[in-house]
Amino acid sequence: MTTPRVERSPILEQIAADFAQRVESSNGHFTPELSTLRRAAFDEFQRLGIPTVRHEEWKYTNLFPLLAKGFHLPPHHTEQPSLDAVLAPLRRWGRVVPLLNGRLLSPDLEQDLLQPLSEAMRNQRWFERLGRLAPFEGNAIVAWNAAFFADGFVLRVTNEQTEPLVAVSVLDAREGNVAVHERHLLDIAPGASLVLVLVQRVLGEGEALLNQVLEGWIGENASLTLVIVQDAPQTAHAITTHELELARSARLELITISIGGGFLRNMPSARLVGEGADAQLYGLTLADGSMLVDHPTTVEHRVANCTSNELYKAILDGRSTGVFNGKILVQPNAQKTSAYQANRNIVLSSRATINTKPQLEIFANDVRCTHGCTVGRLDREALFYLRSRGLNKQEAEALLLAAFAEEITATVPIETLRTDLNAHIEHLLHADELA
Amino acid sequence: MAEPILRIRNLHARVGETEILRGVNLDVYAGQVHAIMGPNGSGKSTLAAVLAGREDYEVTDGEVLFDGKNLLDMNPEERAREGLFLAFQYPVEIPGVSTATFLKTALNELRKHRGQEPLDAMEFMNLMRERAALVKIDPAFFSRSVNEGFSGGEKKRNEIFQLAMLEPRVAILDETDSGLDIDALKIVADGVNALRSPERAFLVITHYQRLLNYIVPDVVHVLYRGRIIKTGPKELALELEAKGYEWVTETDEVAL
């Protein structure tokens, strides 16, 4: 990894000014230890600067045009906006946990299951975990988050949660463009299980950037299904860092559905540290206009006898950009690893681009790792076959694309969410611009 | 006599620089079954593809009237909606699209074109069950992806099943017998025979006479080098089987 050159841009100056004015003055919200940590994170962020395209890992994903829009920390409101209209449709998917500008608004949930991060930080046990999976050292995005996070949640699951939780990040952009930094911790106790949906909503006409960092531990024989739903209008932008550690025989399914939004960069990472652990990562991108969707994924096999599988698919139209960078790391001890990765892309427009790169680093000798990627157009034979049965060109294309997408949405274990996603996708595929 | 349902006049078509059809003339009337035979490379499958509207072929001359309308001006879906059906020689696998979804979409398009209401789920399911029985297709196939993982015989039966569902006025069977064992061939032929009607015509394209033992044609044509060089009654197929294509092609070359 190369160290990026520090960009002394007006953007960084503005972010520093925000830090001085807002964060320092609101430190009462946090413990002194946490305030110290935030100060150190800010210094690190200033040292590293905003990653530029000269940084290998940001080569195809330029943050500067996004940040040039000018994002500010959200203003403090004493009066809370009504979120009913935003939250009502999401209640179909599970129990809704709303966050407004990074702060939890969920008094009805049990304290031992869910609490604000700022409160949990008073407990040394939780404080010690902060940054253990996502340290800010050397990582500008995490450092930026650690310096600025408004708050977040700590979720501790000790049994089988039959009802999915739907954490809704509501960003209030009614008075202009906002950047919200959220920080979450997740602990799935041995044998417990959880389905967690993360979704973003924007209030108002402004644009909103969410910088979300989540650190999660999945205990022995525990299971986590994490569904990241990115279906908001193009004024919603997100940079997500989801660091997950899997103990013995733990199971992770991470499903990212990116079918709406402007600038989306998702950095999931699964670390398999207990034998028999299994990580499944799925991604679907459906991009049009000037949307950018970047998935740098990391799967790290640290011990023997673990399995992982990745399937990321993208349909790109308009001037959209897709990026997939799939890193699989197999450490020397991780014998009998089985790791698969596939990236399949359909490019519908000559102005759309896809950059895809598998990155396998294998230091053990008795492993099975495969990867493959395809970039293509729709199958002409299949199109002709469908048309010869009476479907018009647009219907035939939409049917083939929906089938391509459904392989990913089929992995979503919540039926109502799956139905909504498929309907949304079908609507997008029948819209004039796509296909 | 009534007008032919399909009238092909002086049809010329090429792919790239190679001229494949070099003046095909053919009149097909409703209720008839026409067999088109010929050696490999004679243009049989090209004729089927041009009629169905495959874009790889360029029609350079001639015309095709389908029920009096200019077929060559229509795109593939318009031809299907007017009542033309091609049973593919190599049916395409379509992963992720179930046979039921596919056929429901296709059938409702056709019904819309005919000014009929779309079928509801129950009516559609009943129709599928009834028509699937014609070619002994297990209803379990309905939820499977179109042709995906099907055997050669299953794919061909699925083509005839689609034919039964979409009820075309002209059905072209492109080498439907290729790759079928005798049992599968009988199932396919029984299905086709059950679908013969005074309103419907069939164009059966085949290399071998074998299929015509089961689907008995009214007229047999021999296509050679892009032209129909001989037309006769069903016995012509038997004669070709006995004497080989040289019997007609040699005469043709002399005539040329």
Image (cartoon, helix red, strand yellow):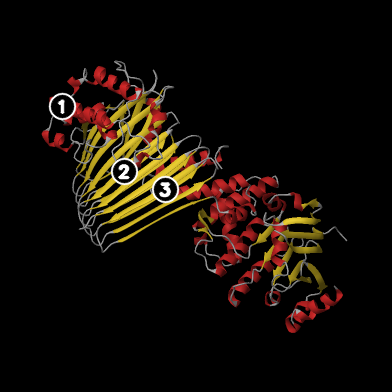
* Number of the label disc, if any, that sits on residue B94: none
**Disc 2 element:** strand
Residue B10 x, y percent position in the rendering: 83, 60
**Mark 3 vs 1, N-terminal side:** 1
Q: Mark 1 falls within which chain?
A: A
**Mark 2 vs 3, N-terminal side:** 2
Q: Mark 3 falls within which chain?
A: A
Amino acid type of the residue tagged 3 in the rendering: Thr
Of the two numbered discs 2 and 1 in the rendering, the one whose residue sits closer to the viewer:
1
Which residue shows up at 27% across the image and 32% down it? A48
Tell me, yes or no, whether the two marked residues, 2 and 3, touch with CB atoms within 8 Å. Answer: no
Distance from Cα at disc 2 to Cα at disc 1: 27 Å
Which residue shows up at 68% across the image and 77% down it? B210
Task: Identify the residue position indicated by label 2 in the image.
Answer: A268
Q: Quadrant of residue B3?
A: bottom right
**Mark 2 vs 1, N-terminal side:** 1
Q: Are marks 2 and 1 on the same chain?
A: yes
Task: Identify the residue position indicated by label 3 in the image.
Answer: A356
Distance from Cα at disc 3 to Cα at disc 1: 40 Å
Residue A420 x, y percent position in the rendering: 44, 40
Crowd band around label 1 with a 10 angstrom C-alpha radius: few (<14), some (14–19), many (20+): some
Q: Toward the viewer: A290 or B32?
A: A290
- Outermost residue on the top side: it is A78
Task: Identify the residue position indicated by label 1 in the image.
Answer: A36
In the rendered structure, the answer to whether residue A221 lies left or right of residue A286 reads left
Rendered position, B63 above or below B204:
above
Distance from Cα at disc 2 to Cα at disc 3: 16 Å
Of the two numbered discs 2 and 3 in the rendering, the one whose residue sits closer to the viewer:
3
